[in-house]
Amino acid sequence: MAGGIGSRFWPLSTPEFPKQFIDILGCGRTLIQLTVDRFKGVCPMENFWVVTNASYVDIVRQQLPEIPVNHILAEPAARNTAPCIAWACWRIKAEDSEANVVVTPADAVVMNPEEFRRVIGNALKFTEKSDAIVTVGIKPSRPETGYGYVETQTDASPAESEIHKVAAFKEKPDLETAEKYLKAGNYLWNAGIFVWNVKTIIEAIKTYKPNISSDMERMKTEADVQEVFPQCEKISIDYAVMEPAAADGKVYTHPADFGWSDLGNWASLHDKLQKDSENNGAVGKVRLYECKNCVVHAEDASKVVLQGLDGYIVSAKGDRLLVCKRSEEQRIKEFSQAD
């Protein structure tokens, strides 16, 4: 899934060129390229599918030239994750009715790809022999209020050694609730990574969202896509399928710890960057004097010098510059829209 606009990473990420296509970590690979890289040995290139906004198709082709062109699905409108996932799975089933599918966002970070491949391999083995829906749950390291949670059943033995039945999905909590989740020990972060057999998910969509299923059946040609897809219900896969399926006892989770982050904001980037002795994380030719607790991204600039800053975000991209207190990060979207 590569259709987001990454508005919280302005000015680095813009609607014309969003974060999944940017080398945010300064490692020489964009986030979507890193996403493909971590599936090496799990999935051959000819089996990859990308769903993205129609305006990003050329960027996807440029950054992932090995993926078949007909496997890049161009959304004519943003309709959230349920129609996006449904469209890809209907198309996959037309090519391989027995396919096992992994769904992943293109803009997350995984610091331990070897462990990621092990977890995904376990989940695929499980869905090969069952009609289960599996979500990957991240073992929480802190009481995080920015993620949804997956509650695992505590009164049932695991379906497999590491795979547990899901009791419920929980919305993003307040701090007090997040602390309770952490203490309880049976709550995981919802990473938005799903594994299932294509027949299983199509049957689930038919059951829980027959209107979306009906829309998918109508999308036979490119003209149909242009007409039907923008009219699809705008809803996430969590609301559309995962929550009702969990209530019916059909959803499982594989707890995981592979250095995952959804890289949704500057704070999460600071967390993943290598820091200096003053807790500064920087990408680009950056020189810091008497600075601490800053995150700086200026890979386009030939030289950046900062002095005396404490707890700031500094980002330069093209002709855009942001200097903002880290404590005011939630206002960046507002700043980006100002004249």
Image (cartoon, helix red, strand yellow):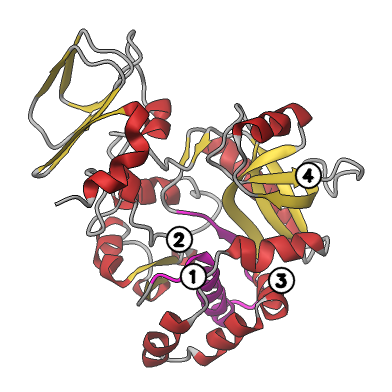
**From the viewer's perspective, is the residue at label 3 or at label 1 nearer?**
1
Q: Is residue 262 above or below residue 112?
A: below
Work out which quarter of the rendered image holds the N terminus and state it: bottom left
Q: Nearer the viewer, residue 50 or 262?
A: 262
Q: Amino acid at mark 1?
A: Cys
The x, y position of residue 191, in whole percent, is 57, 47
261 in relation to 53, above or below: above
What is the spatial separation of the Cα atoms under label 4 and label 1, in whole angstroms?
A: 27 Å
Residue 225 image-quadrant placement: bottom left
Query: How many other residues sit within 10 Å of disc 1, few (<14), some (14-19) or many (≥20)?
Result: many
The residue tagged 3 is 200
Please provide the residue range marked out in magenta: 78-105
- Residue name at image x 45 percent, y 71 percent: 79
Residue under label 4, please give it.
152
In terms of sequence position, does the residue under pointer 3 or pointer 1 come before the other? 1
Look at mark 2 in the image and give the residue it sits on.
1
